[in-house]
Structure formats: structure tokens, C-alpha cells
Amino acid sequence: MKAVVLAGGEPSRLSMLVPRGRSKHTLRVLGKPVIYYPLNAIVRNYSGEIILVYSYSDVVRDAKAYLEAGILRPIKQSIPGIEGAILSASNELGDTDYFLLVFGDLIFDPDAIYNLLDTFYRVNPDAAVLTIPLEERFASTYGIATVDLNGFVKKVVEKPPSIELVEKPVYTLGGAYILPTTILDYLEKNNSLPDAISKLATTGKVACVYWSGLWVDIGYPVDLLEASRLLLSRLGGVKMSSKAVVEDNVVLKPPVYIDEGAYIDHYTVIKGPVYIGRESFIGAHSFIRHYSSLEDHVRIGAYTEIKNSILQPYTLVDSHCFIGDSIIGENTSIGDHVVTLNILPENQKPPRLRQHLVQSIKGRQPLKLGSIIGYNTIVGAGTILYPGTTIKPNTRINPGSKITT
């Protein structure tokens, strides 16, 4: 068996955060590129060769450690689409009966791959697919598997317009599979991967491997917030690099992870779970709080508050700002006294935004989303960004603006 990781294609819905000619798999979450997470999961459970199908060379650069270890074979995608990416690796699969296929834009526990391999070797089916619990609100963005009472796939439906049209019980395909190389024949006849699995299920047994642990598909900007939240929730205590500098009067409430080269200035409060990336700077009297991930080389000015946000590398947020429930692309500059409003109107529900309901004295919290700001953007001082606003890459916003869309 060989492993195939798909890391090609265009960033599409994430294009505002990914500079042209770059791969979405290089976006950072807790100091690591997205591609790290599937590769790490495979390496921890599988000792064979990994074929990395890519479109842009930056994803190969971010997988350099695996390349240098001699376990990674990069193959440039030569045919468009998911099926084309698989077929691009077909020459490398000719001497194997089965291959482990994993989508490269997933963040999940390594145990998911363990369970997939374990089930395959124990049950000895013709194929095995990882499935996750269905969230009906997001069904139209995923492939859906119908499963029989014995735990085998009956049929796969790609992005159904309505879940009511699909036979129950159903689960979401989890982007990890063990497939026979004979499935390449189906794909070469212009069948989609879901159709090919459905055909395989009619002639053989396709085992359904249930997974309810950490799993996030990075397909929309808000998925970065979900991945960051779930990964941060697993931190414990205070982990601080010996090469980081934290002034004596800084308040750290765990869990907090401070990476090497970071500097935290006087009277700053960091209330975890929070990640502070390499070579980052946090100005005096700032407040960095729950579920914030500040990636490498981020600079935060004095008296600024950041909460539940993810800031990509080389972002500058000046003094006296509030950044809440937001995603900021790399090389972006936010002027002083900028505010991101973050309570969405009831009729505004962006795609795949999770609603984490918290009971309080006043009842349930409203759905929140601040701003999604593209890379290489400059936001002028004193700007107010209304909830759910999206700013295209390379935008220049004049000081004192009000952005409502």
C-alpha cells in the first residue's frame, strides 16, 4: 500500500487569504501549515511512501521535513479536479493493490487514520472510507454516504441539494479512504470519486469507519476559526519557548503557548487558550484572549484587544484596536483605533459558520463573526468594520471609513 495526499487545485473560496500562485494548504493554524496536519497523521500510523500531489511548489516547501526524511514523493498535478489529482499519481500506484487517499486540506486527529487502517485490516473489505457525523446545515457542501445496518456503504451522493432526498442513515465523507487501485479504471472513464465508490459498493464491500473526534475541512475562511478553536482547546498549562521574552508584569492565564522569538511587552494580559507565533510582538497593555491564534511575525500595538481570531503571518495591528471573531490575511496592516464589530444580524449566516451556543444569565449568545480581511490590505486608522464584512486582497481603506459589506 502507498499513501496519496491531495494538495493541488486552486484555493477558490479561500482565495482572499491565499496570494496568487500559492496553495491554500500553506495557510497557518497554530504555527503550522494546513498540510502538516494530514501528513503528520499519516506518518504516525503508516510507514510507507507518501505521494504528495501538488499544484504550487510552496506546499512542497512546507513539507520539506518529510521530503528530507525520504518518505515523500512530490508529483505535480497534471489533470484538473480531484479525480485528475488521483490519476496524476496513477503511475506511482501501478505496483500496489490498495492505496491510502487523504485530502490535504483536513485538520484531524492522527487516530482517525489509525481507525481507518485498523478497520481495513480487521474487516478485510474491498475498500474503507472515513465518515463523520452529519451536520445537516452543511450537507450540501460535502459528499454523503448512506450506510446499511452492518456498517457498509450502500451509496455515495455528492453534495445533495436536500438531505431529505437521501436514504437514511447517512454520514459525511471524511476525506480519507483506503481504495483498491482498480478504482482508477472507474476514474479514467470520467466517473467522479463518489460515483466510483458507489459502484464499488454495489460489487463489493466498502466499510464505513465512523469518526467523531477532531476533524475540520479547510474549505471556507471560517473553517480556520473552527480549526484554531478546536486545536487551542487541547492546550494545557503555559508552554513558552526558552527563546521567547515575556516581561515580569505580564499576566498569563493558561492555556497559553508562546513560540520562540516572541516578545510580550509590559502589562499585557493573555487569557488562554491562545497561541503566540514565532518572532511575534505584543505591545504593552494589550489583551489577547480566548481562542486567538497569532501566527509568525505578527505585531500587535499597545492597548489592543484580540479575541477568537486568527492572524496570518506578517500582520500588523496598531494600537487601541479591537479585533474580534475575525480572520486577517498575511502582510496586512491595520491602523490604530480600528474596530471590528462582530454580532451578526439574525438573518445573516455565512457558509459553514459554527454556532457554539453558551448558556448565560441572559440566554444564548448570538452568532458572531467579525471581518475576513484579505492579504496585502491596508485598513486606515479609525475604521469601523461591520459584522461579517469581507475585504478583498490588496485593498486600501481610507482612515475613518465605515465598511458595511
Image (spheres, helix red, strand yellow):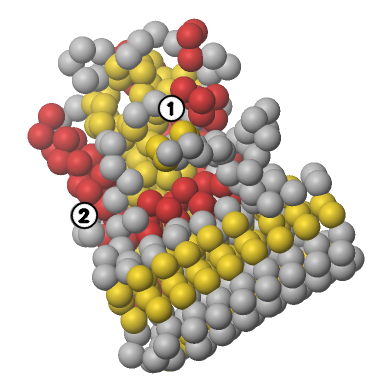
Q: Residue at x 60, y 57 (%)?
A: 324
> Is residue 203 positioned above or below 373 on the image?
above
Q: Residue beneath label 2, please? A: 45
User: SS at mark 2?
Assistant: loop
Residue 160 visible, this angle: yes
Disc 2 and disc 1 in contact, CB within 8 angstroms? no
User: Left or right of 243: which side holds 395?
Assistant: right
> Is residue 94 positioned above or below 381 on the image?
above
Residue type at tag 2: Asn
> Is residue 201 positioned above or below 290 on the image?
above
Q: Residue beneath label 1, please? A: 135
Report the residue that reaches farthest toward the right: 398
Within the image, what quadrant is residue 377 found in? bottom right
Q: Residue at x 39, y 65 (%)?
A: 272
x%, y% of residue 376? 75, 68
Q: Residue at x 33, y 67 (%)?
A: 255
User: Disc 2 vs disc 1: which is toward the camera?
Assistant: 1
- Taking depth in this image into account, of 91 and 257 the one nearest to the observer is 257
Report the residue that reaches farthest toward the front: 361
User: Left or right of 336: which side holds 43?
Assistant: left
Residue type at tag 1: Glu
> Is residue 96 positioned above or below 150 on the image?
below
x%, y% of residue 379? 79, 66
User: SS at mark 1?
Assistant: loop
Between the C-alphas of marks 2 and 1, the distance is 28 Å
